[in-house]
């Protein structure tokens, strides 16, 4: 049951875990479960990290009504910042690659955030470089949330996503599958689960190479590597072609009734590959967001 609260931020977390039965046929003792993160009020898993980053900064006096929160984002974290900023009366500015979906910029602006655009050809790394330039020019104006290096990104998932999954599966989870962008979801959730049971396997999902554009995911070999990321943490890494991710995303909508985003399709492809190899086990895959922010991309045409 969803908890009741006086503020929208109190509804972040406690997302449902959904069983998938049609997208793949598995052995009787294997379960494939999806953590439905679009049930968060901002529409994505990024609500969790954004809330921890904002509340920690406010508690430390780094962020107040006299400062502007700024960060680079491919969309979801920016929407989360904007929503939380509106709820807490904090000004928010975002730097996004100019080719992010129209729905993402519109939603962030609807919450009152100011959006700056970076070179679309430079992707998320270009947005990082641009936000660093803006902060260097106006250091007194901004609180730089820096989601790629902020330990609260990992802490949010260690304290919420991981415990939820362990409790929802009654400790039976054997594999965690998650995409890597900022890597906070993988690192925090995976670390908590491994602290509960060292036998749990953690699988990271990334694009097959730097030319495969899967919004929200980074190809670490050529990207600016997040400071919170530990390259040797995951037990296994699965690479996904963009075309395959598109196909699985559409398949989830038509066969499971799950209207999800592009990176969720990539994560599901990897989860299915893992689940097919098992004689028994419980595979949990993180589905970061819904498909409504991708309509203008032609994904579902």
Image (tube, grey):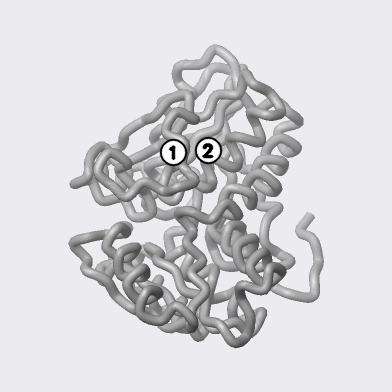
- Residues 136 and 263: in front is 136
User: Which of the image's four quarters has the C terminus?
Assistant: bottom left
- Residues 21 and 260: in front is 260
Q: Which residue is mark 2?
A: 285
Kindly state the secondary structure of the residue where label 2 is placed: strand
| Residue at the outermost top position | 279
Q: Is residue 176 left or right of residue 296?
A: right
Check whether the beta carbons of the residues at disc 2 and disc 1 lie within 8 A of each other.
yes
Indicate the quadrant where residue 61 lies.
bottom right
The residue sitting at 66% across, 41% down in the picture is 162
The reply to whether residue 253 is in sight is no
- Residues 75 and 18: in front is 75
The residue sitting at 36% across, 48% down in the picture is 217
Q: Which label sits on residue 143?
A: none
- Residues 46 and 285: in front is 46
Indicate the quadrant where residue 119 lies.
bottom left
The residue sitting at 56% across, 67% down in the picture is 42
Neighbour tally class for label 2: few under 14, some 14-19, many 20 plus, Cα within 10 Å: many
Task: State the count of labels.
Answer: 2
Q: Position of residue 123 (x, y in %)?
A: 26, 59
Q: Which residue is mark 1?
A: 268
Kindly state the secondary structure of the residue where label 1 is placed: helix
Q: Position of residue 139 (x, y in %)?
A: 44, 78
The reply to whether residue 218 is in sight is yes
Q: Position of residue 30 (x, y in %)?
A: 58, 21
| Vertical relation: 248 (above or below) 103 | above
């Amino acid at each position: 049951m969803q908890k009741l609260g006086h503020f929208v931020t109190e509804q972040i977390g406690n997302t449902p875990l959904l069983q998938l039965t049609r997208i793949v046929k598995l052995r009787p003792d294997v379960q494939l479960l999806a953590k439905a993160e679009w049930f968060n009020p901002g529409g994505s898993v990024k609500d969790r990290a954004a809330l921890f980053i904002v509340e920690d900064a406010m508690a430390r006096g780094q962020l107040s009504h006299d400062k502007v929160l700024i960060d680079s984002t491919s969309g979801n974290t920016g929407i989360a910042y904007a929503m939380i900023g509106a709820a807490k009366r904090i000004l928010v500015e975002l730097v996004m690659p100019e080719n992010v979906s129209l729905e993402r910029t519109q939603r962030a602006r609807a919450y009152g955030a100011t959006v700056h655009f970076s070179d679309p050809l430079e992707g998320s790394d270009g947005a990082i470089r641009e936000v660093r330039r803006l902060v260097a020019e106006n250091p007194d104006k901004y609180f730089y949330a820096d989601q790629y290096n902020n330990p609260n990104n990992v802490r949010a998932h260690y304290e919420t996503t991981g415990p939820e999954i362990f409790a929802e599966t009654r400790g039976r989870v054997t594999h965690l599958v998650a995409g890597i962008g900022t890597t906070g979801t993988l690192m925090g959730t995976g670390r908590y689960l491994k602290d509960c049971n060292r036998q749990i396997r953690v699988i990271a999902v990334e694009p097959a190479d730097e030319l495969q554009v899967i919004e929200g995911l980074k190809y670490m070999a050529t990207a600016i590597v997040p400071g919170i990321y530990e390259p040797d943490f995951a037990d296994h890494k699965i690479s996904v072609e963009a075309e395959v991710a598109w196909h699985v995303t559409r398949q989830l909508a038509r066969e499971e009734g799950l209207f999800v985003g592009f990176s969720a399709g990539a994560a599901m492809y990897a989860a299915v590959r893992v689940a097919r190899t098992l004689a028994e086990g419980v595979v949990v895959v993180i589905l970061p967001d819904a498909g409504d922010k991708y309509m203008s991309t032609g994904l579902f045409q």
